[in-house]
Amino acid sequence: MEKYVKILKENNIKITSPRLVILKYLSENLSHPTADQIYTDLKTNNPSLSKTTVYNSLETLEQHGIIQSITISGSELHYDLNRGMHHHFYCKKCGRIYDIPLSCPNIEKMSNYGHKIEEVHGYIKGICKECLKKGRI
Amino acid sequence: MEKYVKILKENNIKITSPRLVILKYLSENLSHPTADQIYTDLKTNNPSLSKTTVYNSLETLEQHGIIQSITISGSELHYDLNRGMHHHFYCKKCGRIYDIPLSCPNIEKMSNYGHKIEEVHGYIKGICKECLKKGRI
DNA sequence: TGTTAAATTGTAATAAGTACAAATTAGTAA
DNA sequence: TTACTAATTTGTACTTATTACAATTTAACA
């Protein structure tokens, strides 16, 4: 848990129980959970946790660049620790999100349009390996 | 309007008035409107148009690859004609979405993970040229 | 022109996310 | 340690994008 305290300290944000457990949860669950999944899972051992707090904490963590939100599904946000550039694959059948360890070779070119670039997301959609195997397509 | 009839015919989908006006609208409005913007704008000259129809029609057009939905904003879908690969820039300040005429050089590599790839989206976020100019940052 | 399956329409429902005010707590300073 | 204050958490109520569904209408074809 010291690890997470350190991260919050480094970012000059108050060390609170919800922030710590959410950060720990995201460190241990790299499956890109939604706010609701995080809330439901953590609620068991943190009965006083409020859904609003989960949303607030996620927003704070994101603003400090500690985590990122992923808009790939189009219906709800998924969350991911910010650990090096990678892309995401979304399965239209089962909804799972996979990491794709590629980085974008175009990032420099993107600055040529006059916009200030803060984030780059590569989203790929289709049918995942598992669903193909199950013949669910 | 014949142009849009042709597109629907080529895709073997029924030629209906809502589909035609929505397709025309998207052809003339490349600013990535939301379903609600499309509905509101078209409602004036098509009073019988229903919001559900807009959603249904957009879904049909997307399923046939005629248009694509863009999940960049995270809060609602935006729609775009499917015309050649390009990326999108989202301004966190004003919400505008800009086209970025780059294609992804990584597409072949993406097939190496065993998933069936159907769509590739490049999303860039930050502060747009206009907002930077206005000093709104 | 009649038939039928598909599409449209309006209303009601769902679900993700936000607003807000009251209660609590982290961090600081005495 | 204690007291203070601003920030955070909490619960409830609300908003908003999207979907479900049943009744009506319509496109396509015989």
Image (cartoon, coloured by chain):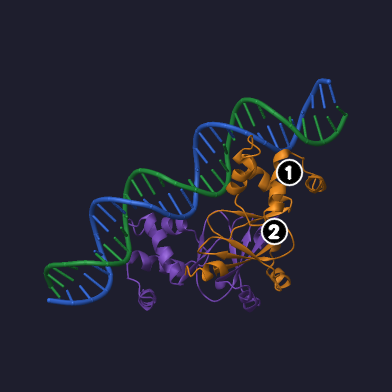
Chain colours: A purple, B orange, C blue, D green
Other residues around mark 1 within 10 Å, as few (<14) / some (14–19) / many (≥20): some
Residue B17 lies in quadrant: top right
Tell me what residue is drawn at x 52 percent, y 55 percent: B75
Side (left or right) of A61 relative to A16:
right
Residue carrying label 1: B20
Q: Is residue A65 shown above or below B59?
A: below
> What amino acid is at disc 2?
Leu
Residue A58 lies in quadrant: bottom left
Tell me what residue is drawn at x 54 percent, y 60 percent: B95
Q: Quarter of the image containing the N terminus of chain A?
A: bottom left
> What amino acid is at disc 1?
Leu
Q: Is residue A82 visible?
A: yes
Side (left or right) of C2 relative to A69:
right
The label shown at residue A132 is 2
Residue A125 lies in quadrant: bottom right
Side (left or right) of A136 relative to B132:
right
Q: Is residue A80 shown above or below B62?
A: below
Q: Where's residue A3, x and y in %?
A: 39, 77
Tell me what residue is drawn at x 46 percent, y 58 percent: A35
Tell me what residue is drawn at x 55 percent, y 65 percent: B91
Measure the C-alpha gap from mark 1 to mark 2: 35 Å
Q: Is residue B121 shown above or below B39?
A: below
